[in-house]
Image: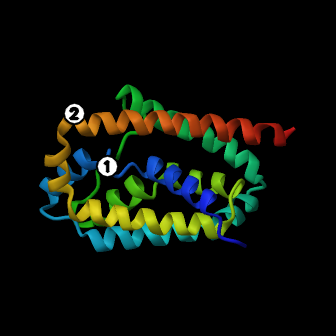
């Protein structure tokens, strides 16, 4: 297991696009209004635990169900494809459920906003192409960014404005779409 900067950078960008913490700022602001305050440390820590656990145990869990990593990566490419369509077209395909405001740092912020189905699918998909050490480093870098954004949500929203946030969502949506296509094409041939 050698650290590879190219793999680390690629995995970091994929994770950043999937987590889309900048694009989640309007949702985070809404949650903050409803709950009063977002516990950035708790949300970041729980997200980190979920992602690291799934990085190391996720493959074992899917094998328990008789699913290969390449099959999961192809399925993950579809999830990423639909997430990218949400970002690009501004439609909502994945509906968030209503939860208690007392658990807002964990539900819905840590799960599913930060470490949701798209993130978990991405981690398994990345394992099909990159070494774990590079993915783990990418997770840690993204958690530092997540923490910073959660702490500075109000300031970032004011700085970017609605237009800036919308542009970022569209740009990362296109990147995510390209990643979904790459994951699909890299793994679909290995299924046959």
Residue in view at x 82 percent, y 37 percent? 189
Colouring mode (rainbow / by chain / secondary structure / one colour): rainbow
- Residue 94 sits above or below residue 45 on the image: above
From the viewer's side, name the closer residue of 164 and 101.
164
Q: Secondary structure at mark 1?
A: loop
Farthest top residue?
Answer: 89
Quarter the C terminus occupies: top right
**Residue hosting label 1:** 22
Residue in view at x 20 percent, y 43 percent? 160
From the viewer's side, name the closer residue of 63 and 161.
161
Residues at marks 1 and 2, CA–CA distance in whole angstroms: 13 Å
Q: Residues within 10 Å of mark 1 (few under 14, many from 20)?
A: many
From the viewer's side, name the closer residue of 53 and 173.
173
**Residue hosting label 2:** 163
Q: Secondary structure at mark 2?
A: helix
Quarter the N terminus occupies: bottom right
- Residue 104 sits above or below residue 168 on the image: below
Question: Which one is earlier in the sequence, the residue at label 1 or at label 2?
Answer: 1
- Residue 155 sits above or below residue 4 on the image: above
Residue in view at x 54 percent, y 70 percent? 52
Farthest front residue?
Answer: 5
Location of residue 84 in the rendering, given as x and y in whole percent from the top left corner: 47, 35
Location of residue 176 in the rendering, given as x and y in whole percent from the top left corner: 51, 39
């Amino acid at each position: 297991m050698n650290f590879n900067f190219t793999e680390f950078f690629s995995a970091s960008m994929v994770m950043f696009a999937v987590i889309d913490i900048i694009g989640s700022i309007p949702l985070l602001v809404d949650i903050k209004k409803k709950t009063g305050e977002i516990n950035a440390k708790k949300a970041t820590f729980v997200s980190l635990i979920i992602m690291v656990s799934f990085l190391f145990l996720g493959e074992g869990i899917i094998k328990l169900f008789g699913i290969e990593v390449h099959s999961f990566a192809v399925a993950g490419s579809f999830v990423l494809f639909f997430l990218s369509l949400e970002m690009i077209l501004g439609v909502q395909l994945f509906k968030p459920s209503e939860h208690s405001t007392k658990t807002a740092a964990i539900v819905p912020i840590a799960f599913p906003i930060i470490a949701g189905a798209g993130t978990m699918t991405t981690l398994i998909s990345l394992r099909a192409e990159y070494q774990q050490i590079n993915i783990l480093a990418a997770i840690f870098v993204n958690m530092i960014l997540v923490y910073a954004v959660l702490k500075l949500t109000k300031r970032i929203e004011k700085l970017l404005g609605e237009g800036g946030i919308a542009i970022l969502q569209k740009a990362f949506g296109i990147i995510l779409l390209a990643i979904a296509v790459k994951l699909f094409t890299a793994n679909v041939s290995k299924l046959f």
